[in-house]
Amino acid sequence: MQRIPITPAASKRRYVVNLRLTPAQIQAFYAGDVSQVSARDRQGVRIAFPIVSLRRFIGHDGISGTFAIEVDGHNRLQKIERL
């Protein structure tokens, strides 16, 4: 059987999610009660990732917006950006 190498670019996946986290939900993170965010992307795939990765997007009203989440071939978070 011949092996086909997987290039890093081919093994990355991108998910687009709409997020709305209230200030109370963010407070649960700071209290240590919550460590993960679980959301469905636009295709219906459920993904979970560390809430700490959203820290730079936290405002007085919590977190709200559409985000692109990129993971590698091992489903490790690589990048989150607001769209």
Image (tube, rainbow, N blue to C red):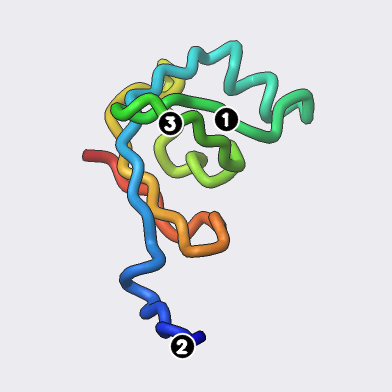
Residue 26, percent from left and from top? 58, 22
Depicted 77 relative to depicted 16: above or below = below
Q: Quadrant of the C terminus?
A: top left
Q: Pointer 3: residues within 10 angstroms few (<14), some, or many (20+)?
A: few
* Front position among marks 2 and 3: 2
Q: Quadrant of residue 11?
A: bottom left
**Mark earlier in primary sequence (1, 3):** 1
At x 61%, y 42%, the residue is 50
The label number, if any, that marks residue 37 in the structure image: 1
Q: Secondary structure at mark 2?
A: loop
Q: Residue at x 28, y 40 (%)?
A: 82
Residue 70 screen position, x and y as percent: 39, 53
Alpha carbon separation for disc pair 2 and 1: 39 Å
Location of mark 2 (residue): 2
| Nearest to the observer: residue 71 or residue 81 | 71
- For the residues marked 2 and 3, what is the alpha-carbon distance in whole angstroms? 31 Å
Q: What amino acid is labelled 1 in the image? A: Val
The amino acid sitting under disc 2 is Gln
Which of the marked residues, 2 or 3, is nearer the chain's N terminus?
2
- The CA span between labels 1 and 3 is 14 Å
Closest to the camera, between mark 1 and mark 3, is 3
Residue at x 57%, y 36% (from the top left corner): 48
Determine the secondary structure under disc 1.
strand
Residue with the mark numbered 3: 45
Q: Amino acid at mark 3?
A: Val
Circles 2, 1 touching at the beta carbon (< 8 Å) = no
**Residue 22 location in percent, x, y?**
49, 13
